[in-house]
Amino acid sequence: MIVVDKIKPALAEVYKSEDVEVRLRRYKIACILSIGGTASGVTLDYVMNPEFIWPLFYTRFSAVFIVLALLAITRTRIAKPRVIALNLIWAMTVNTSICGMVYITGGAVSPYYAGLNLVILAAGVLLPWTLIETLFVSLVTLVMYISTCVLWGFTAGETIVWSLLFSNCFFIFLTGLISTTSSFFTTQARIRDFNLRIELDSRNKELEDMDQLKSEFFSNVSHELRTPLTLILAPIQDLLKRPEVLSDSVSRHLRMARDNSLRLLKLVNDLLEVIKLEEGKSRMNLRGVDINDFIAGVVNSMIHMAEPRQITMKVESLEESHVVHADVYAMERIFLNLLSNAIKFTPPGGEITVRIFAENQIVFIEVSDTGIGISEDEISFIFDRFRQADSSITRKYQGSGLGLALVKNLTEKMGGSIQVKSKVKVGTTMTVGLPIYEGVVEELGVLGEPSEDILQSIHQSAEHRAALPVSSPFEQSESELPEGEGPSLMIVDDEPDMRQYLVGFLEGEYRISQVRDGKQALDLAREYLPDLMLLDLMLPELDGHEVCRRLKGDPKTRNIKIVLLTARVDEGAKIIALENGADDFLTKPFSRTEVETRLRNLLETSKLESELIDRNDDLERALSELKQAQSNLIRSEKLNALGGLAAGLLHEVNNPLNYVISAIHLAQMEPIVKANEDLTEYLDDINEGVGRIRNIVSDLHTFAHPSEVDKRKAFSMSGAIESSMRFTASECTNLEIVLELADVDTIDGSEGHIVQVLINLLSNAARAIKRLNKSRPGKIAIRSERFDDRMRVGVSDNGIGMDEETMGRVFEPFYTTKDVGEGMGLGLSICHTIIQNHGGAMDVKSVEGECSEFTFDLPLVREKTSENQSDNIALGYS
């Protein structure tokens, strides 16, 4: 029985046919193994049961003869339709023979029952039986064994060892279970394999049909393209032969149209030739060709393509020329492709050598260059159709990937071979081998010379002109943005013709820079910041998406408006372009009007955005100034309020304070007080406290009446600094004082108040240093420098410094970081007010835990001399 449950009804017969073939093949193997195993068992009989040697011998070879007969049936026509029956007969024959040997050698005690396990195992593993078939044979084998043991006990009159019989039956059953399970999974695997093979064959057939349809489509399209291309090229070439009736601009456009039409025609011709070779429709017109003359002609026709890039081309020919049997047209296409590739991949100043030599009746033509070379990984597929060493959108070298595939096919069609050797950055050698021909040499025309037939002439031009790409990665094309007025535009495209076309109608409206690859575009855009950029998607080095993404991600270049040029028209390409930051995109081909309109719209958008950014900056600046004015107003109002409060307090405090001072002074003059030390000490303490109150009142007076200063007069800043240092000498003991003072320092202001400011700053600096607990040597620096008609003074220390919050509030009245009783927080506020009243400003800079610096500026007295600049006296300040 054949299992076809999981086989499609339409394929059931196919599966049955294959199953029969497999069964028959495996059946033959089983027969041969059973014949060998049964016959070789004679040695086992001789060792274990020599007393039964002849009965066992007859039993064995009876089975051998029957299996031989079954094997012979496989050669007849009745074998295939009855292959299942033959399989079962084989199993029953072998099992009967084994049961016979079990009966002869003692029934249940006979070790020959193990042969039954082997038969069941072979049925499940070796033979492609189904679960039902294996289960049937296993059960029949078990019944045969039990029957044989019972029959032996009955005929021999011996007692059956039932425990041993049960043990042997258990192992036969277990072997049958394993074989049945194996048969089930083997059958399922065979069905799956069959389905997969059928599906694979179906897919292969579909692929073959699709490949055939594709070839037919390409062939039809190529044929259809050749006609209009010929009709385009013929009148263009006629017009170019009459330069006297054409302007320079028209001639330039016609030459561009001709060259690119020839490129397209060559691609169409290559595609047609590859399809013909694949389908076996290409016909070779073989004849005797003198290889020296032929190669010399091809090289001469290509020299004009190498000369503009200073590439040397030379031929090393045989002294005695040889003849090959070849198609001239095919040979011309082969070596035009090889030489054009060598020119394309060789840097300027390189060398191309064509060497001809003969070995073993084969002529070899080597085309060697000193170009960029090919890596080992890429060599394996350079002859595949539509494959290039670099197939990414950032590849440096343009091409369809048909050239070398065509070269290989044409060479093999003529009975030749082609080999390649290459090393990266050293060069490449292509070697074509063709068999030597003993026939007559036929005359060749001059290669590359136009034919009198207009159509043939056009196709020759396509081979010679368009074989070489229009651009080379070694050619530098980047240009700076020209100076002048008007919007700037950067055109980025690796095709010179495309750049020339765009420049032709845009140069009157824009200042244009031309760039050929993505890396150059990125560098020049960052340097010149053009207003607009026309950016091709497929570029060497960096593709258009990457250039766009980097420019838009840089704050310096993000405002450049980018139009991405792409030949892809699908929605996904547009989305990717927009995701990478492109402002717009154009799909090739595009019209002049479309390019001009899109650029003009983007330029207007850019102007509006710039105006919006400028207005936003103005608003932010005005808002900042408003906040500063509001802060100053609040501060002024706060100071005025505090000043009024301080003035009121002074009036109420001064009178009783004067009475207290006078009373203490009179008390100290009394003899009884002078005689009592305790009383004198008490009065001194009281006098000290009153003195502190008097200092506070003095500070409040200065704060409340900041405009009540000495009359403004000229004084020396260096003199004021020296005075302040004398007043603070006790506080600055053991501190290093460094001075850097300007030579000209005559100030217009109140010297007393400026001395007060300096004393306050020096005292604060000394206290800030002492709070460091002498962790480093204390240092205070005082500097003054002149700028224009003002003097800037700075007092810095390497003390404890301030955090940002303290720096923000340090000039507020009554704000202090000192301990209680050490100050009211008016000192720096008074200093700030004094400097403001002098028309200056006071600032602070600090690093917490390291240093602080207070600076302020004051007006200089206008000097009658013409000296505008003074030298500094360097006294060690750093």
Image (spheres, rainbow, N blue to C red):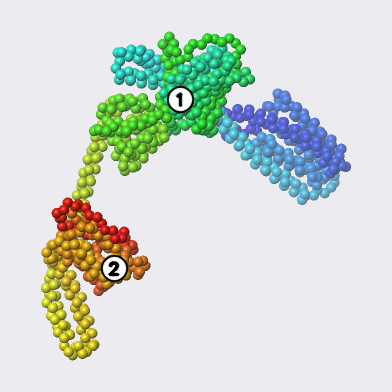
Amino acid type of disc 2?
Ala
Q: Nearest the camera: 553 or 827?
A: 827
Please say whether residue 222 is visible from this viewpoint. Answer: no
Q: Residues within 10 Å of mark 2 (few under 14, many from 20)?
A: many
Q: Secondary structure at mark 1?
A: loop
Which residue does the numbered mark 1 point to in the structure image? Answer: 311
Task: Calculate the distance from the C-alpha at mark 2 to the C-alpha at mark 1.
Answer: 80 Å
Q: Secondary structure at mark 2?
A: helix
Q: Position of residue 350 (x, y in %)?
A: 47, 27
Compared to 371, does 779 lie above or below? below
129 relative to 156 in the view: left or right: left
67 relative to 425 in the view: left or right: right
**Residue displayed at 14% across by 54% down:** 864
Q: Position of residue 383 (x, y in %)?
A: 52, 26
Q: How many marks?
A: 2
Mark seen at residue 766: 2
Pick out the residue farthest to the right: 51
Amino acid type of disc 1?
Ile
643 relative to 203 in the view: left or right: left
